[in-house]
Amino acid sequence: LMISQELGRDRYLSLRSTLMSEGFEPQPWHKINDHCNSITPERVPVIIDQNDGIIGYRFDFKEICKYIVNRSLLAANVSVANVPEHIYIGGKDGADGSGQHYRRAQVHVAVKGNILLYSFTPLIICTGDSENGEVLWRNPAPNSALTQRPLAIIGAKEDREEVLRPLIPQIEANILYISANGFDMQFMGKDIHVSVHSSLTMFDGKMHAALQGTGGAYCQMCRCSKTNCHKLHYVVNGFLVDRNMDDMHAIFSMLTNNGESPVSKREGDYDTRAGVTSEPITHRDLSTGISVTHAWINCCSWFLNLLYHLAARDKTWGFGNKADARHKKLMQAKTKAQDIFATVLGRRIDTADGTGHTGNSLTGNLAKRFFSEDCRNLISKLVKTSDLIIIKTIHMNLYVILRIISSKDHKIDVDKFHTLCTNTYIEIIKNFKWVNLTPTVHKILAHSPELIEKNDCLGIGHLSEEGLEACHKIIRRFRAYWTLQTNDTVNMKDLIKKMWLISDPLFYSFRRVLKCSKCGSTGHQRKCPLFQESINKSESDLMVEDIFIE
């Protein structure tokens, strides 16, 4: 109750007094606080520079895994007799930053107004030493902010190399050591050995480039240049995921004699430099997944830009200088598009964020609604030329592709999916030669089939960074209203504790489970599969079902 309602001491004592007057006997505050401390690992201060002092706190990865095993098996009601001597934890991890943080009663932004969050999300616990064993516990919401176990919270911007370069290898070494050797622990008095595997998939494009050291690369998955990625014969032949971290480290060593960053760039050296601009921070594989949430957002943003140009009948990519007449024409087309789509979306898309924070109103959920059939039918109000049929086809194909990528448990016909992605890529290149594809659109169309094939022909939605992104809103609220306010250091120490408590698997199991009113099942509330079978399915639904094998 204290965690779900974000109760501090005073509010809890007031509630306890009311409950006691009604005949209940809730625990006193000090026992609640002692229990919270007993289920929280030791918080280790992070010091990068002695002059800066403590800039954040982290947990030991081994201790995190011990708590995860204990709390998850309790949440699943697994008895000691059914726990084998060897179990396996599979999960994902990653880092992301957020800004515009305040503390309570503060006029200005906190001294450490930016936060870098590194989290680990357990996905499955099963018997044996791989995910092929009997499932003991499965994460009910792998992309929820309430299942992200914090590994570290640092008061710094995510693009500060002087922080990332010493911090990430330290966390990485901890994870890799446990992944290679496992560890022994006790569960209710029984000795067990735990194996761990975690994939580094939760990051956005900025973090990906920083970790890989490829700030000058067009694509972080292949070495193809931007120019070649827009050539038809390259698209027909396909693009392989050919970047690996060993090669990136080797390229950096080749280009620099003394290991200094940044790497100097020269015209025409992309084939040898491969976009490497600094020393890679990590040695772990970064090509096992795509940032699914950012894929929706960035594909939507790119498609909107294409619409603005078609509506303005301008075939020069980019908005240009504000003083140019074409900029004014494109802005008028943008305003018209925003007004038209607002009738379906309920708000203006691709505009300044109205919540008071920097950023854009375009979110993952809004992007998913934009690619719906209702918005597709409105495109004809913007595009009056012969491009209408092609642009609506691209809109639908992107929607289907993103839905396939975001899926979790469906087996996918990779050949059909590859054909759809390639044909969409070709349609764009052939019909809109003046358009520049963003790196995200290129990744989705060129590399997602190969990634899905490597994932046993399953979607990669469970590897999404959506939960990590959703933590930013919670962190802002907690820093202002539910953490100690003495100073930034104390504030962050209490913050990582609160983020740990709200992501407890046992506490999550106490939450009310929403069930469908039509079939009584969980996992959906609005689109019931039983109800969908009795109505006319859209063309995109039929395309998705055709690509799904099971």
Image (cartoon, helix red, strand yellow):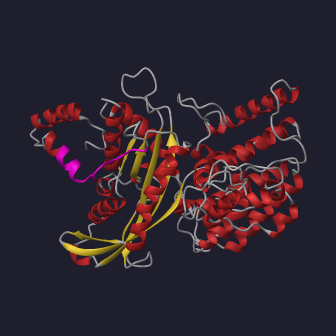
Visible in this render: residue 213?
A: yes
**In the image, residue 260 above or below residue 477:** below
Q: Position of residue 402 (x, y in %)?
A: 65, 57
Furthest residue in direction front, as rendered: 258
Residue at 81 percent across and 32 percent down: it is 330
Q: Is residue 230 magenta?
A: no
**In the image, residue 245 above or below residue 103:** below
Between 378 and 108, the one lying in front of the other is: 108
- Asked which quadrant contains residue 313, the reply is top right
Between 530 and 511, the one lying in front of the other is: 511
- Asked which quadrant contains residue 379, the reply is top right
Residue at 44 percent across and 62 percent down: it is 173
**In the image, residue 476 above or below residue 130:** above
The answer to whether residue 15 is left or right of residue 341 is: left
The answer to whether residue 190 is left or right of residue 91 is: left
Between 223 and 266, the one lying in front of the other is: 266
The answer to whether residue 439 is left or right of residue 109 is: right
Total count of labels = 0
Q: Quadrant of the N terminus?
A: top left
Between 119 and 72, the one lying in front of the other is: 119
Q: Position of residue 447 (x, y in %)?
A: 69, 64
Q: Position of residue 426 (x, y in %)?
A: 83, 60
Q: Quadrant of the C terminus?
A: bottom right
- Asked which quadrant contains residue 353, the reply is top right
Visible in this render: residue 538?
A: no
Residue at 48 percent across and 53 percent down: it is 168
Q: Position of residue 117 (x, y in %)?
A: 45, 46
The magenta segment is 33-48
Residue at 31 percent across and 60 percent down: it is 63
Q: Is residue 38 magenta?
A: yes
